[in-house]
Image (cartoon, helix red, strand yellow):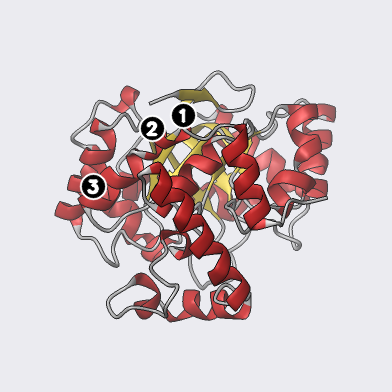
Amino acid sequence: MEYRRLGKAGIKVSELSFGSWITFGNQLDVDNVKKCMRAAYEAGVNFFDNAEVYANGVSESIMGEALKEYKREELVVSTKIFWGGKAPNQEGLSRKHLIEGTLNSLKRLQLDYVDLIYCHRPDPETPVEETVLAMDYIVRSGYAFYWGTSEWPAYRIEEAFAFAREYRCIPPSMEQPQYNMFVRERFEKEYAPLYEKYHYGTTIWSPLASGLLTGKYTKGIPEGSRLASVDWLRGVMQRDGYFSKETVEKIESLLHIAKNLGCTLAQLALAWCLKNVHVSTVITGASRVEQVKENMKAIDVKTELDDNLMNEIEKILNNKPQ
């Protein structure tokens, strides 16, 4: 396992990490969470990702129980704040919700601090300066070591840096964007200036395009699969054309490359993400220990992806941002 700097920050995160989105509290109970986290940890994972909204807080509570089995200083733990409830001030990036949401997350995680904390989405109703001041307070108070953004447009991140510089606040250190073989525009194009200007770190999510890049959906949605049970996610993917004939043909071609490499399509897709120098860590997810172990083998596949293979994959995808 390689441990990468989070942009220019001093902290190091494992190149593959483990997240709780959708699975913790929905597909996995405490015992199975512990088993999956242990398998990831034994493979070298040190970064575990969460959010207040996942399973309405249950995800954090379950992870909090599992974290008791580890030395705190050996781990990097994150959470994200935006959707904390249905009351008027339980959503968004106001100073009130950011601070109260952080404290509530820490209670559920049973931690004194998290290493990383994110503003889970941009909030058009709250001034950027209010958000930056609140995050500065959270970090200076020791509730988190670093703060970042998730799915913010580049111009909003620029605004946050400009305000932080002018008022000597702690600026964000990292972004958590979606990035995979089929979702590339924001990561590779829109954020490109941020990597050069601020050395912005990234902790990418959905590297397998919500399971599409496992190859199991090329002939429909199997009974018992994630998409068979998560209606809203299936609807989003259908709306965005993830099951189009063109996409299925691309997946079948990628399956051929994976077969020649002696790996799974999931391992190939994860390794492809790891080849990008601007990726600090790839957040993986799993509902079974076997999936965790399979995903971790992507590290070996990464070394097999030379320039020729990467170019062959690029020709298949034919979606490189211009």
Crowd tier of the residue under label 2, counting other residues whose Cα lies within 10 Å: few below 14, some 14–19, many 20 or above: some
Disc 2 + disc 3, Cβ < 8 Å: no
Is residue 115 left or right of 200 when viewed as pictured? left
Q: In the rendered view, tell whether residue 232 sits above or below residue 190.
A: below
Q: Where residue 238 sits: x, y (%)?
A: 56, 80
Q: Where residue 245 sits: x, y (%)?
A: 59, 77
**What's the residue type where badge 1 is placed?**
Thr
Residue under numbered circle 1: 303
Disc 1 + disc 2, Cβ < 8 Å: yes
Q: In this rendering, which labeled residue sits more in front, label 2 or label 3?
A: 2
CA distance separating discs 1 and 2: 6 Å
Q: Residue at x 29, y 80 (%)?
A: 223
CA distance separating discs 3 and 1: 25 Å
**What's the residue type where badge 2 is placed?**
Asp
Q: Is residue 105 visible to the viewer in this orientation of the structure?
A: no
Residue under numbered circle 2: 300
* Mark 2 or mark 3, earlier in chain: 3
Residue under numbered circle 3: 36
Q: In the rendered view, tell whether residue 188 sits above or below residue 274.
A: below
CA distance separating discs 2 and 3: 20 Å
